Image: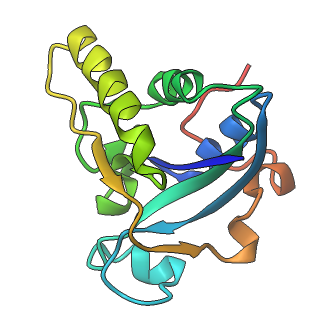
């Protein structure tokens, strides 16, 4: 099984979106690459921890490729907005790809390059190794399954 982490605005919708892709075996929402230890949602929302809301994805590469997962990620974000996705604003909502396996970096960078070629504005989605990760509180896990009418910036079919 392979793993990758995406920041794409509010993590509720990103989690629901990826959990529906065949080959994705597990999703979890959490906080990545900040400067404190064991942050809470309230702390992350204060804009001073440098954490980003993310979805940690485990997938079976025999069923779905990293290229496909990256293509799907680009479909749900605006890669040209800094610290913002739809109505969500703040550093915790920045877009990012956080890799665990350094062998994935070339594929990620090539994917970002292809997206840049399609955009008139600079792509600001960060690409970094996952340095720090904490699971979000239980009430955030599978939030839109538990709360089907909850807010989401991603359009589902």
Total label count? 0
Which residue occupies the foreground of this view, 67 or 62?
62
Query: At which x and y percent is residue 76?
Result: 51, 28
Residue 80 position, x and y percent, is 24, 30
Q: Of all residues shown, which one is farthest toward the front?
A: 103
Q: At 44% from the left edge and 26% from the top edge, which residue is drawn?
A: 74
Residue 87 in sight from this viewpoint: no
Q: Residue furthest top?
A: 118
107 w.r.t. 157: above or below: below
The quarter of the picture where the C terminus appears is top right
Q: Residue at x 81, y 54 (%)?
A: 147
Would residue 88 appear left or right of 117 to someone viewing this image?
A: right
66 or 76: nearer the viewer: 66
Task: Kindly identify the residue that appears in the image at 29 percent across and 60 percent down.
Answer: 91
Is the residue 130 above or below the residue 104 in the image?
below
Residue 49 visible, this orientation: yes
Is 144 located above or below residue 107 in the figure? Answer: below
70 left or right of 64? left
- Residue that lies at the very extreme toward the right in this rendered image: 146
- At a point 14% along the width and 27% down the height, the residue shown is 122
């Amino acid at each position: 099984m392979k793993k990758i982490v995406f920041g794409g605005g509010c993590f509720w919708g990103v989690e629901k979106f990826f959990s529906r892709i065949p080959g994705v075996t597990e999703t979890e929402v959490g906080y990545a690459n900040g400067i404190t230890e064991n942050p809470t949602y309230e702390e992350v929302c204060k804009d001073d921890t440098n954490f980003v809301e993310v979805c940690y994805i485990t997938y079976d590469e025999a069923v779905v490729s990293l290229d496909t997962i990256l293509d799907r990620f680009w479909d749900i974000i605006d890669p040209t907005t800094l610290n913002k996705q739809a109505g969500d604003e703040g550093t915790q909502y920045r877009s990012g790809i956080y890799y665990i396996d350094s062998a994935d970096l070339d594929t990620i960078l090539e994917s970002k390059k292809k997206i840049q070629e399609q955009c008139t504005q600079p792509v600001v989605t960060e690409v970094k190794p996952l340095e720090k990760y904490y699971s979000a509180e239980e009430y955030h896990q599978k939030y839109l399954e538990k709360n089907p009418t909850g807010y989401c910036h991603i359009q589902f079919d």
